[in-house]
């Protein structure tokens, strides 16, 4: 028991099921039906096949044909101008090869121009906030220096007093010491 392709089911009598069940199979017990006057073939529905062929003509063959005609016209015009040197053909083919990259190059140029414009606006705007930031930094540095001096001042006074006492004591001892 397995899945059977619709084409095989059509060959077996039109039942779309496993193909091994009874005619009243609960899976798919109806025959494939098509609109009036259209017969089902083993290749598939003629309506969908016609739509597929029309889509292939419009999306594949038409652009391919127009591209070939365009290349032929360019080749004819270049050949007719009397400049049939190899470098002329190389220049023409290089120009045709570069055409697909033109939109991406224009997009990158637009991004670059937007970046340059934005940088110019930033340079115009930046001095004011930079000045304010510098003033804030100077105020913060001043406050930090004042607070740190206030915290360290008692320690420095204590150390200076002890150093003064030690130096005074040594001087006093040096007076009484004999050499």
Image (cartoon, grey):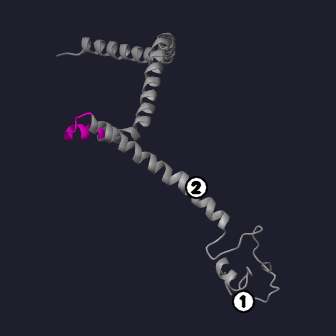
32 sits left or right of 155 in the view: right
Across and down, in percent, residue 56 comes to 54, 57
Rounded to the nearest whole Å, what is the CA distance between mark 2 and mark 1? 37 Å
Sequence-wise first label, 2 or 1? 1
Across and down, in percent, residue 157 comes to 44, 14
Across and down, in percent, residue 107 comes to 45, 32
Residue occupying the point 78% across, 68% down: 36
Residue 166 in which image quadrant: top left
Neighbor class of circle 2 (other Cα within 10 Å; few <14, some 14-19, many 20+) is: few
Disc 1 target residue: 20
Dots 2, 1 in contact, CB < 8 A: no
Q: Secondary structure at mark 2?
A: helix
In this picture, which residue range is highlighted in magenta?
81-92
25 sits left or right of 63 in the view: right
Residue occupying the point 69% across, 80% down: 10
Q: Secondary structure at mark 1?
A: loop
Image position of 121 with respect to 53: above or below: above
Task: Evaluate whether residue 156 shows in this view.
Answer: yes
Confirm whether the magenta stretch covers residue 85.
Answer: yes
Q: Nearer the viewer, residue 126 or 175?
A: 126
Residue situated furthest front in the rendering: 80
Q: For the N terminus, which image quadrant?
A: bottom right
Task: Evaluate whether residue 5 shows in this view.
Answer: no
Confirm whether the magenta stretch covers residue 83.
Answer: yes
Disc 2 target residue: 55
Residue 3 in which image quadrant: bottom right
């Amino acid at each position: 028991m397995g899945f059977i392709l619709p084409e095989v089911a059509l060959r077996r009598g039109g039942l779309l099921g496993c193909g091994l069940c009874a005619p009243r199979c609960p899976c798919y017990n109806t025959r494939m039906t098509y609109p009036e006057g259209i017969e089902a073939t083993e290749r598939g529905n003629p309506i969908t096949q016609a739509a597929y062929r029309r889509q292939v003509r419009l999306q594949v063959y038409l652009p391919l044909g127009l591209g070939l005609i365009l290349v032929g016209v360019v080749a004819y015009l270049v050949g007719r101008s009397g400049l049939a040197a190899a470098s002329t053909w190389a220049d023409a083919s290089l120009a045709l090869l570069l055409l697909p990259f033109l939109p991406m190059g224009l997009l990158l140029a637009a991004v670059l121009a937007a970046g340059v414009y934005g940088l110019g606006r930033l340079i115009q705007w930046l001095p004011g906030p930079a000045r304010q930031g510098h003033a804030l930094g100077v105020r913060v540095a001043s406050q930090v220096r004042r607070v740190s001096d206030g915290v360290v001042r008692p320690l420095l006074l204590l150390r200076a007093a002890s150093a003064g006492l030690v130096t005074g004591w040594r001087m006093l001892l040096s007076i009484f010491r004999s050499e």
